[in-house]
Amino acid sequence: EDTVKRMVAFNGKTRFGIDFPADADNATIEKTAREHELTPKYVEGKQIVKVIIVPKRMINIVCK
């Protein structure tokens, strides 16, 4: 497979998925997740504390 679908979660709750190239690095994955069109809906009025990337599976954006 040349693409991997990774689910994006906010505070542990899965919200949407994004397709990435299988060889994408963590910096690219984090940047893409932060800039996705649906991200502002979930982080509005909150501060992003941490971004946790589980290899080939998911991205969890921790907000408070």
Image (cartoon, rainbow, N blue to C red):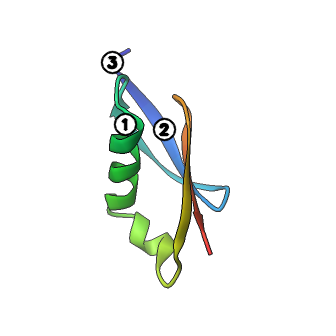
Residue under pointer 3? 2
Q: Position of residue 10 (x, y in %)?
A: 58, 61
Classify 10 Å Cα crowding around label 1: few (below 14), some (14-19), many (20 and above).
few
- Compared to residue 47, the image places residue 59 above or below, namely above
Task: Judge the density around disc 3: few (<14), some (14-19), many (≥20) Cα neighbours within 10 Å.
Answer: few
Residue named by callout 2: 6
Q: CA distance from mark 2 to mark 1?
A: 6 Å
Mark 1 — residue?
19
Amino acid type for the residue under numbered disc 3: Asp
Q: Position of residue 15 (x, y in %)?
A: 54, 56
Report whether 54 appears left or right of 36: right
User: Residue at the spot x=62%, y=75% of the render?
Assistant: 64
* Distance (Cα) linking label 2 and label 3: 13 Å
Seen as rendered, the residue at the extreme bottom is 45
> Which quarter of the figure has residue 53?
top right
In the rendered image, residue 27, in percent from the top left (x then y), is placed at 37, 43
Q: Which of the two discs, 3 and 1, labels the residue nearer the N terminus?
A: 3
Amino acid type at image mark 1: Asp
User: 10 Å neighbourhood of mark 2: few (<14), some, or many (≥20)?
Assistant: many
Q: Nearer the viewer, residue 40 or 27?
A: 27
Are the two marked residues, 2 and 1, in contact with CB atoms closer than 8 angstroms? yes
Q: Secondary structure at mark 1?
A: strand
The amino acid type, in three-letter code, at marker 2 is Arg
Quick check: 19 left or right of 55? left
Residue at 35% of width from left, 34% of height from top?
20
Is residue 46 rendered to the left or right of residue 34?
A: right
Q: Disc 2 on helix, strand or loop?
A: strand
Residue drawn at x 33%, y 42% is 28
Image height of 23 relative to 16, above or below: above
Q: Nearer the viewer, residue 55 or 20?
A: 55
Image mark for residue 55:
none
